[in-house]
Amino acid sequence: MPRLASFSGVVVMIYFGDHPSPHVHARVGRPGNRGVVEACFAIETGELIDGVIPAAQASEVTRWCRRHREALHADWTRAQADQHPTGRYD
């Protein structure tokens, strides 16, 4: 699961061979610690499609997805072929 970006306490990842439709995963908190939450956001619209993260951070992820939509679509395609994304978005 390549990490694409991190900002405002959010880590955005894309999973290899993940189920359609094109989306990214956003995690708040550190794995192994209590209070870790994760949500999925549609690449096309930035819409929250599954999970829960704090509202302010969800809004930031939505804006981030919209700003990087074209590159994210290309990286989604690469990830479905088990290839790493072309770059980081930090």
Image: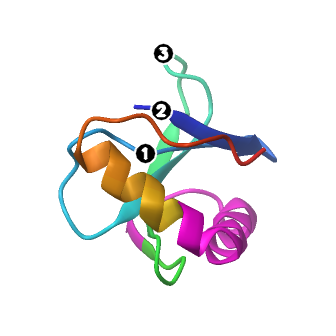
Range drawn in magenta: 49-71
Q: How many neighbours does mark 2 have within 10 angstroms: few (below 14), some (14-19), or many (20 or more)?
A: some
Picture quarter with the C terminus = top right
**Residue 48 in view:** yes
Residue 70 in the image, given as x and y percentages of width and height: 56, 72
Image: 35 above or below 68: above
Amino acid of disc 3: Gly
Please name the residue shown 72% across and 40% down the image.
6
Question: From the viewer's perspective, is residue 79 above or below residue 74?
Answer: above
Q: Quadrant of residue 61?
A: bottom right
Identify which residue is drawn at 46% across, 80% down: 44
Q: Secondary structure at mark 2?
A: loop
The label nearer to you, 1 versus 3, is 1
What secondary structure do most residues of the magenta stretch adopt? helix
**Could you say whether the residue bearing mark 3 is in a helix, strand or loop?**
loop
Q: Is residue 78 magenta?
A: no
Marks 2 and 1, how far apart in space?
6 Å
Look at mark 3 in the image and give the residue it sits on. Answer: 32
- Which residue in the protein does label 1 denote? 14
Residue 2 bears which disc, if any? 2
The image position of residue 20, as x and y in percent, is: 20, 65
Q: Is label 2 in contact with label 1 (beta carbons under 8 Å)?
A: yes
Residue at position x 79%, y 46% in the image: 7
